Image: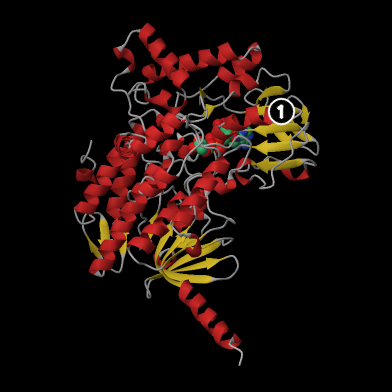
Amino acid sequence: MSDGPTLARLQAAELRDNRDLDAVIVGAGFSGMYQLHLLRDRLGLKARVLERGNGVGGTWYWNRYPGARCDSESHSYSYYFSDALLQEWEWSERYPQQPEIVRYLNFAADKLDLKRDIQLDTTVTAARYDEAANRWRVETESGETFTAKYLITAVGCLSSANVPDIPGRDRFQGKWYHTGQWPHEGVDLGGKRVGQVGTGSTGIQAVPVIAAEAGHLTVFQRTANYSIPAQNGPLSSEFKAWAKKNADEIRRTMYASTNGHPFLMAERNVFDVSAEERRAIYEKAWQVGGLRFRAVFQDLLLDKAANDTAAEFLKSKIREIVTDPQKAEALSDIDHPFATKRPPIDTGYFEAFNRDNVSLVNLRKTPIIEITEKGIRTSEKEYELDIIVFATGFDAMTGSLLKLGIVGRDGVPLSTAWEAGPRTYLGLQVAGFPNMFTITGPGSPSVLCNMPVAIEQHVEWVTNCIERMEEKGVERIEPDEQAVSDWVDHVNDTANATLLPQAGHSWYLGANVPGKPRVFMPYAGGMARYRGICDGIAASGYEGFVMDGETAGSPIAAAVNISG
Ligand code: NA7
C-alpha cells in the first residue's frame, strides 16, 4: 500500500500548522535572525521569518555594489549576545566587506539552526490585524497566508531603494543599476563609460572601486560631502586575540557610548584647547581614521562654531588631496555642518578624482535635465554613458515598513496613521497596531547607532515584553496615544538640541524622497540614554503601553530623565 496520500495529508497539516504561528517576523537580517532565535529558543514560541531575498543577510544581501563595506569596525559589527559566536568567528579586516558580512550571517544562522524557520523568496504584501481574533493575517506575494499573535518587523532602515524619477530614465539604451539592488552576478564595468549619480556613504565607497575598473567614470554630485579615510586594513592576529579576550569590555564600551561604537566620546569641548592643539587632534583622528573622528570632541554636534573647526579641517584636506583646483573647489563646497548627514568614510575617494579617467559634474551649477537614449543631459551638455549607477540612497526608515501593506485596528493603514510622518512609542510600537513591534523603527536610535547594538537592545526588549505577556496571559499590547505624542515630542526636542536638523536635505529627515513628510526620524538622544529609558519603562510595568485595554499612563516626562 502506498503511503502517498497519508504523507500528503501530513505535509498539508504541517504546512497549516506552520502558517498558524505565535509570531511572524519579517526580514532575515541581523534583527530578524536574532528575534527568531530568542522567540523560538528562549521562549519556546512558534515563530517564522519571512524573507524576500533568496538568502539571509537583509541589507547586506542586497547591497552588493562595488566597494560595499560596513563603516562600523568589524569587531563591533557582530552579535554580542553569544560568546560562542564571538569566539568562533574571525573578521579579516578592520571594516567588514559585504561578502564577509553575508558569510558571517550565514555562519550565525547555521550555528543557531535558524534556517529551518526562515522562509526565503517570500515577499509580504499585506499584514492585517483581525481584532476579533486578535491575530495578524500576513499575506505573501505567492498567495500564502500566515496568522500570528505577534507581528515583528525586522525590515531594516535602509532597504527600500530610492531611484530618482529623472525624466527619460526608461529610454536609456545602456544599463542602469541602483547600488542597493546590485545584480548578484556582478556588473562588468571593464572599459565602460560609467556615470554615477550620488555621493553619499555608498557613492563615496563606490567611486574608487568603479574608477579602477571603468574606462571612464563621471561622478554627478548634487551635494558635496565630507569624508574621512577609513584607514582600512587586515586585522593582525594580536588584535583578533585581543578582541576575543576583551569581548566583555568592548560590549561595556559599546553600551556606554552615544552611538554604540567600541569607543567613547572624548570629554572635552572644541574650545577647551588651543587652535594648534585642535589641529593636532584632528590630524591624529584623520590618521586613525573612520567614525572615531566624530568622537574627538563632545560638542561637535551641539555647537555650530565648534563644528565649523572640524568642517574647515576636513575641507582643507580635500583641497590638499585633489590636485585639479576646479574639482577641489566643487568637492569642498559643502553646505551642511560636519556629521549632520551621516559622515561617510572612504578608501581613496578624493584621491580618485586625481585619475585621468574620473571627471566630476557639479549638479548645483549644471543640474540634470533628463536621461537620454545615450546618457545624462545636464543644463550644460550631454554625457554619453554605457552604464548609470544610482547611488541615490533609500526611502529610509519608513519605506520598507510602508511597503508591507500593514493595516491596524479599525482598518487603518499604517500609511494613513503616518501620513504626517512616523509616530511611534520608543520606535517600538504604533498606537492602533496591537502586538506589532518595529525593530529599529523610526523614533529609536537605529541609524545613529552601530546597528547590531541597536538591534540587540530592541530584540531583547521585545522578547522580555512578550515573555511577560505570555506569562501573565496578556493578549494585547499597544502604546497609549498620549505616550506616543510625548515620545514624538521628545524625539523632536532631542534632535532640535543638536545641529542634526541643519542638513535640510538629509535622509534622516526624509528630505531625499519627493513628497515624504519632513520629520527627523531617528532618536538623537544617544543609545546609552535610550537603553536606560526603555529599561525604566519595562521595570515600571510598561508605562505608556496599554495592555488588554488598561493604560499604565504616559511616563515620558519622567522617563526621559532616567539616565540623562
Ligand atoms: P544617501 O546618503 O541618501 O546619498 C544619496 C546620494 O544621492 C546623495 O549624494 C544625494 O544627493 C544623491 N541624490 C539623490 N537623489 C538625487 C538626484 N535626483 N539627483 C542627483 N543626486 C541625487 O544614500 P547612501 O546610499 O549613500 O547612504 C545611505 C546610508 O547607508 C548611509 O548613510 C549609511 O548609513 C549606509 P543630496 O545629498 O540629496 O543632494
Residue 461 screen position, x and y as percent: 31, 53
Q: 482 or 244: which is nearer to us?
A: 244
Please, what secondary structure does the residue beneath circle 1 have?
strand
Residue 433 screen position, x and y as percent: 38, 61
Q: Is residue 360 above or below residue 512?
A: above
Q: 4 or 289: which is nearer to us?
A: 4
Residue at figure coordinates x 65%, y 33% from the top left: 197
Q: 482 or 30: which is nearer to us?
A: 30
On screen, residue 443 versus residue 91, left or right, reads: left
Q: Quadrant of the C terminus?
A: top left
Residue where numbered disc 1 is placed: 217
Which residue is most to the bottom? 1
Q: Is residue 363 something that shows in the picture?
A: yes
Q: Circle 1: is it few (<14), some (14-19), or many (20+) Cα within 10 Å?
A: many
On screen, residue 372 versus residue 66, left or right, reads: right
Residue at figure coordinates x 40%, y 52% from the top left: 439
Residue 509 screen position, x and y as percent: 46, 38
Q: 465 or 2: which is nearer to us?
A: 2
Q: Amino acid at mark 1?
A: Leu
Residue 1 screen position, x and y as percent: 61, 93
